[in-house]
């Protein structure tokens, strides 16, 4: 069977990706979520609260977004 | 018909189903009675609350076939399917909430292709509108047929009858109530869907003896399977090396969900492309009462998304324990219904199934009508059309799309599932989502991206994914004497990565070779706005290529 340059490129990428241990991949998944969490926490109030500021805790979108990401971090750290 | 006997419905089941259907239709009609303009039909008059939109986002994303198909995939391939609801949704929704959705909302557009015309040119808009329209119109037929087949198999109902009744009901309330009816009925459907699926999860866990017992018995099942693979030699739990409960699978896994596909293809490309660029998804947040509520709807949706895999995927794992002899994953959930749900409660699951089906169909129907009305009729046929006339166009388009969906479903039903046509339409979205996202992303991030380059890159990207799909068909690579390009089954995640990369490279190269865009286009680039913002009332109509405010 014929192997084109595309096949060789695919084989090379597969070989490289197979050498990365799954533990490192888990760190990549979790670190990406943590990075996103840090970005959310550092967002200015203008991006996360209604005009005139939050009058109740649930009007601060940072809390909901951080909560959703924390659940994801726990899930990807454990499963 | 194997499962129809075990899943026979009783009078109380039918009462639950009829109550659900009456409630849904009544709500759609009540909302539609106040409908007067195109803006109300396509964007709910920009009066939709965040909590309804958030639930609608989730309901739209989970189709009727997903309710059964995701559980089946979990049965066959394990929990890795949950990636599509977790890392394949939540991060993109949060980035969308704080970055893209407010940007699109402020631009005052009705559709994503409309935004692309303002940033690039009419060619990019037309190509993207055509892609979305073809995808949505075909998908309507596929949803109708696939769900009717499922209802026929699981409940023993007449397939043609299921298709016609579903089309008439969904078409009816979408025709009358537009986006507002879609969003509010989706909200009910989301609740019914979660309740029905939760029922299976809870009863399944009770039957097994809890989460701990489920994990223990899954490990035992893995050991048994590993022993079979190793030809009778017994293996320990550690040696069994299960992929069943893991989200992250090695690059050389035999399942369709290797980690490079999940991380690069799903989390970084397909997921943002879907949540930031899919008209059926984005449209409802454009109908929010304010920019803040548009953001809040995505955050609420992201929170809800966290529980979806628990109720749709874990039942597949429960089936591994309770029904270990099943040969086909798609039988897992229907069989569980027969085993777990007593007569009377099956009606709730059927209502959940119908809710999932209807919530996706109504969204695609309304969004496809929005694209026809705004991106084709208003853009190319009558640019001065009144809002009242546009409402009529939207409604007529809705009827035509329903008729088309039924015809297309009948056409598909005459074809063999092995003909490949069915599979082509199911992978249709993967063909253009990667290129569409590359064009959108570079358009809003990079001031130097030009319209001409975006148009060429979009066509190259779509051509790439279609070529990869064709070259990966056994008949094609066999005729060429080639090895298959991909090692996994259904490598659609990889199509999107390559198509995205090709689109991005072509867009950058052609942009740098051409002349920069005029400054008017740069208001649609992050950081390139002029500071004048729009209130929802300012953005009543499409502002056309010049765009009024951002």
Image: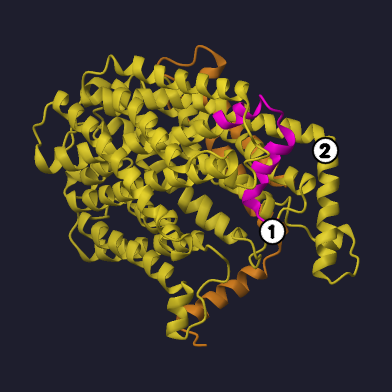
Q: Disc 2, disc 1: CB below 8 Å?
A: no
The vertical placement of B397 against B294, above or below, is: below
Describe the element under mark 2 as helix, strand or loop.
helix
Q: Where's residue B350, x and y in %?
A: 57, 32
| Chain where mark 1 sits | A
* Residue B247 lies in the magenta-colored region: no
The chain painted yellow is: B
Instruction: Please state the total of marks drawn on the protein image.
Output: 2
The segment highlighted magenta reads: B327-351
Numbered tag placed on residue B251 in the rendering: none
The vertical placement of B522 against B449, above or below, is: above
Q: Which residue is mark 2?
A: B208
Describe the element under mark 1 as helix, strand or loop.
helix
Magenta span: helix, strand or loop, mainly? Answer: helix
Q: Where's residue B373, x and y in %?
A: 20, 37
Q: Which residue is mark 1?
A: A24
- Foreground pick, B98 / B93: B93
Q: Where's residue B420, x and y in %?
A: 44, 64
Q: Residues within 10 Å of mark 2 (few under 14, many from 20)?
A: some
Real-space Cα distance between discs 2 and 1? 34 Å
Q: Can I make out residue B343 in this image?
A: yes
Q: Is residue B173 left or right of residue A79?
A: left
Q: Where's residue B514, x and y in %?
A: 19, 63
């Amino acid at each position: 069977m014929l192997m084109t340059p595309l096949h060789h490129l695919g084989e090379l990428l597969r070989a490289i990706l197979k050498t990365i241990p799954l533990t490192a991949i888990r760190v990549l998944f979790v670190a990406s979520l943590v990075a996103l969490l840090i970005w959310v926490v550092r967002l200015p109030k203008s991006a996360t609260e209604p005009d005139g500021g939050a009058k109740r805790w649930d009007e601060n979108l940072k809390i909901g977004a951080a909560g959703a990401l924390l659940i994801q971090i726990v899930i990807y750290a454990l499963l | 018909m194997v499962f129809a006997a075990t899943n026979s419905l009783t009078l109380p089941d039918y009462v639950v189903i009829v109550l659900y259907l009456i409630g849904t239709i009544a709500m759609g009609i009540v909302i539609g009675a106040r409908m007067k303009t195109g803006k109300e039909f396509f964007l709910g008059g920009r009066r939709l609350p965040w909590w309804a939109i958030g639930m609608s986002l989730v309901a739209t994303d989970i189709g009727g076939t997903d309710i059964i198909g995701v559980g089946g995939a979990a049965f066959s391939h394990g929990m890795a399917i949950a990636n599509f609801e977790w890392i394949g949704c939540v991060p993109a929704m949060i980035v969308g909430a704080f970055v893209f959705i407010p940007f699109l909302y402020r631009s005052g557009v009705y559709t994503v292709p409309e935004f692309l015309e303002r940033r690039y040119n009419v060619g990019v808009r037309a190509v993207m509108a055509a892609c979305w329209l073809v995808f949505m119109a075909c998908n309507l037929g596929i949803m109708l047929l696939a769900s009717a087949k499922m209802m026929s198999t699981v409940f023993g109902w007449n397939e043609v009858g299921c298709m016609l009744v579903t089309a008439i009901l969904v078409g009816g309330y979408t025709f009358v109530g537009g986006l507002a009816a879609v969003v509010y009925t989706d909200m009910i459907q989301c609740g019914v869907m979660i309740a029905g699926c939760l029922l299976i999860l809870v009863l399944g866990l009770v039957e097994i003896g809890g989460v701990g017992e489920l994990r223990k018995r899954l490990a035992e099942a893995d050991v048994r399977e590993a022993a079979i693979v190793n030809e009778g030699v017994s293996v320990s739990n550690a040696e069994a090396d299960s992929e069943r409960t893991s989200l992250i699978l090695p690059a050389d896994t035999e399942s369709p969900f290797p980690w490079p596909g999940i991380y690069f293809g799903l989390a970084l490309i397909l997921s943002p492309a879907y949540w930031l660029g899919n008209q059926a998804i984005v449209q409802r947040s454009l109908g929010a009462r304010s920019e803040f509520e548009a953001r809040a709807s995505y955050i609420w949706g992201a929170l809800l998304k966290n529980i979806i895999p628990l109720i749709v995927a874990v039942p597949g794992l429960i089936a591994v324990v309770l029904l270990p002899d099943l040969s086909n994953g798609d039988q897992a959930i229907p069989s569980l219904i027969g085993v777990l749900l007593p007569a009377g409660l099956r009606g709730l699951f059927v209502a959940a199934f119908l809710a999932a089906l209807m919530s996706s169909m109504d969204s695609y129907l309304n969004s496809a009508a929005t694209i026809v009305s705004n991106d084709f009729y208003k853009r190319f046929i009558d640019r001065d059309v009144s809002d009242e006339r546009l409402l009529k166009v939207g409604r007529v388009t809705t009827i035509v799309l329903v008729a088309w969906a039924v015809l297309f479903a009948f056409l598909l039903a005459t074809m063999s599932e092995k003909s490949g046509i069915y599979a082509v339409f199911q992978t249709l979205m993967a063909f253009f989502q990667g290129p569409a996202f590359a064009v959108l992303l570079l358009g809003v991030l990079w001031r130097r991206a030009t319209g001409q380059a975006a148009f060429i890159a979009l066509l190259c990207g779509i051509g790439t994914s279609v070529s990869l799909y064709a070259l990966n068909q056994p008949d094609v690579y066999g005729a060429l004497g080639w090895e298959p390009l991909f090692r996994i089954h259904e490598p659609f995640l990889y199509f999107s990565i390559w198509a995205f990369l090709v689109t991005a490279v072509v867009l950058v190269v052609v942009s740098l070779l051409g002349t920069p865009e005029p400054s008017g286009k740069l208001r649609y680039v992050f950081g390139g706005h002029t500071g004048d913002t729009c209130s929802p009332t300012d953005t009543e109509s499409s502002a056309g290529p010049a765009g009024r405010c951002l």
